[in-house]
Structure formats: structure tokens, C-alpha cells
Image: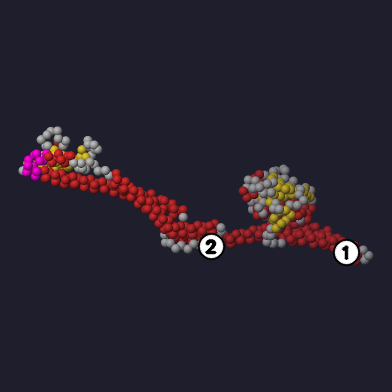
Amino acid sequence: MRLTLKLALAVLPGALLVVAAAAFLELRRDRAEFEADQRADDRATAGAFAEMLGNMWVAGGEAPVRQAMARLAAFEARYRVGWIDLRRADSPLPAAERSAVARGEQVLWQDVTSVPPGWLHAVSPVRAAERIVGAVDVSEPPPDLRAHVRRTIRATVMTTVALAATMMLMTLLVGAWVVGRPIASLISQARRVAAGDLGARSIPRQRDELGLLARELNRMLDRLERAAAEVSASTAERFEALAQLRHAERLTTVGRLASSVAHELGTPLNVVGGRARLIVEDQQGADAHARIIIDQADRMTKIIRQLLDYARRRPPQKGDQDLARVAADVFPLLATLANKRRIQLMFHPEVASAPVTADATQVQQALTNLIVNAIQASADGATVDVTLRGGPRAAGDEKRTAIETFELAVRDHGPGMAPEVLARVFEPFFTTKPIGESTGLGLSVTHDIVDEHDGWIEADSAPGRGSRFSIFLPRRAA
């Protein structure tokens, strides 16, 4: 409706200008016609008086003519009728007009020195017996067109107001039908598309530019819908590939842990074998030996179950988790690898609980990758510290501004990394280890997991002072 109103207001000044120009031209035409009529009337009147006075001169001489002219001069009317004696030099008739009248011609001239200026004089020669005895002057003041102008202006104003009202009404009605309705349909379609409905279509009923715009918009949405379907399929494939990649990385970690787990299982298996032999040899202590066998079997079962749970592929399942417990569950599985290297894993929870919304398996994978890297970077007999504390508010990122977090930090006391290596640690397939010892995906996968949980990861390292990797995850709203 606003566009239609703007269109009407844009057209209105042009229409008003046309009306004003027409009124101006009408006034000029009326004035010209009035002046032409005035000249014709004055000529005819002067000619009639000249003919009458000529007849009087022939019949009675000059005296009756003078008397008649005196009576006409005393008569008050719009016209002034006067006698011009062509023999007198002080005649008000200009010299050129006087010569023309003396030759028997009728003349018109305008006196600019009169009051008011512009009196029109029609001078016609008076003939008596084929002789010009004088001239009669019929004069008239300039026409007063003010009343006519006022009437014309009043009529023009009324016509303009009526025309403006009619134009506004017609433009609004036609604009609302021809422009407003299709534009409202396009706006509704655009809002549906903005809300995510790519199936929104308008039905173009017009064959003008708006109809063409609607058809082009429908074709564009067809292409967008196809592209969205392709992107959706590609995204699903990407997520599937990413899940396979993460699973492969977990299997790689499981492979690293397998030898340590086998070593860890050796001790309880020896205990089980020994106690079984004692049962055979010592029937009286059979119950005690059986309990020890059961304990060692439970220990082996727990170790194997942890390894299998870590290796098992499952879909992402975010839920309410305690980050302290999720982190604590990682240590029994990694203890065998650490013990093999005589490395001590230290967990320092500075908070009693750390409620987050997360997929426990994915967070454990991220933390496992960091701890395994720390173990591999540490010298035999060193310590790897894992700290859980309340993290700072995120800053400098619109997505994370004012988010309360928990920080899960893994610190080793290894050789550290040079700045150029630190800058690339999260790149896929980047590794400083020999070929065959690492896929270069561990930190990349960790970075992606943390990002999918709306958190972020920071790395701090320098040659000679070890490395620290900190995972920041948002706290769960109370």
C-alpha cells in the first residue's frame, strides 16, 4: 500500500502542473480573444459614427456635426467619442496615424500615456461629398480581466482538487490490485523462505514484470531446493565419514593400548593359574583361593570391557554428564599404558562436580587423545597432570560471549614444541612422529569434538618446558 501511495504522490505533481499550464493557456487565449473582439467592435463603432457624421455634414454642414459631437462627449459610457480636426497641428493623433487617416484609412492605436495607460483608439475618417472633413475617435480603456481571472482561478482550483482526489483514489485502487497484491504475495513468500521453507511458491497471475519476478523467484527456489537436498546428502556423508574417522582413531588408540592391556592381564592370569593349582593341592583353603580367582577374573573382565567400550562405534548421544566422572573413567584404561612407560597419571579435580551437556564417549576420546600424546611426549618416570577446574568466561567470540565454562587441562613435562609446530598441531594428518607411529588425526579429531560441544581448545607449549592442552566446555544451565 505504501508503494501505491508513493506512486500516486509521484503522479500527482505532474497532473497538477498540466492543469495549471492549461489554465494559464486558457487565460492567454481568453485575453487574446477579448482584445480581438474589442478591436473589431471599436473599428465597427468608429466606422458607424464616421458614416453617420458624414451624412450629417452633407445634410446640414459642420454645425450639426459639432453639436452632435458635443452631446456625445457629455454622454457617460464605456466608450469615449471625440472629433479630430485634421487641420490642427495640436491634434492628439500621432503623425503616422494622422497621415493614414488623411489618406482615408481607418487606424487603431494605443495611448501609453493615458490614465490608465493602454487606452485603445479607433479612428475613422469622416467623408462628406468625397472629401475628408475630419475624423471620429472612438476610444476604450484597457480591459479589466481581474474578475475573469478570479473566476478562472476558482474554477481551476476546484477542478484541480477534484482531479487530485480522483487520481489518488483511482491510483490507490488500481495500484492495490495491480501492484500491491502481487507484491504482498512476494513478501509473504520471502518471509516463508527466510523461515526456512524452501518449498514456498507463489502463483503468478500477471504477465508483467511482477509476474516475471514471481516466476524467476520460483525457479530460483527450485534450484535452491535441489542444492539444499544435495548439501543435506553431502553433509550426511561428511558426518558419516567423520564418524568413521573418529572410530578409526579410537581403534588406533586401542591398538596402542592392546599390548599394555595384554601385559596387565598377565598378572591376574598368573594369580588365577596359581590359585587353581592350590585348590587342587589344598582342599581346606579352596574357598579362599576361589574368592581370589573371582576377584582377579572381575579385574580382567573390567579391563577388557573398558577396552571394548572405548573401541565400540555408537551414534553421538549428548546428555547431562558430570565432566569429573567422565574424566575419571578414562584413567583405568590408560593406566596400563602409563605403567608400561613408568609414567604417573595424576588427576586433580578442583571442583566436586562439573555438570555439562555432552556425549561422554566423544569427550573421553578427546581426553584420551590428549593424555596418550602427553604419555608419548614424556620421559620414563615423568608425571602427566590432568586438572579439572572452573573455567573463565569466553570472550572475543560472539558465539561464546559470557559463557561459563569448565577447563579440563592435560599437562606433560616433555620437551615441548617450537612455535611453528604449535601453530599446526590441530591440522589433520600433521605429525612430528616417525611414519607408522601416528596418523596425525588425534588432535584434529579432538578439536572437532570440542567444537561440536560449543567449546574450544587451547594449546600452550615452548621448547624445554612441556606442553599444556586445555579443553573448555560450557557449563550446563541449572
Which label sits on residue 199? 2
Q: Amino acid at mark 2?
A: Gly
Residue that extends furthest to the left in the rendered view of this protein: 129
**Is the magenta region chiefly helix, strand or loop?**
helix
Label 1 belongs to which residue?
Answer: 290
Q: Position of residue 269 (x, y in %)?
A: 83, 61
Eyeballing the image, is 131 above or below 207? above
- Label 2 crowd (10 A; few <14 / some 14-19 / many >=20): some
Eyeballing the image, is 84 above or below 16? above
Q: Position of residue 202 (x, y in %)?
A: 49, 62
What residue appears at the point 73 percent right and 52 percent down from the top-left corner?
A: 354
Q: Earlier in the sequence, mark 1 or mark 2?
A: 2
Which callout, 1 or 2, points to the residue nearer the camera?
Answer: 2
Q: Position of residue 181 (x, y in %)?
A: 46, 59
| Magenta span includes 57 | yes
What residue appears at the point 70 percent right and 51 percent down from the top-left corner?
A: 475
What residue appears at the point 21 percent right and 40 percent down from the top-left corner?
A: 119
Q: Position of residue 6 (x, y in %)?
A: 43, 52
Is residue 327 among the parts visible in the rendering? no
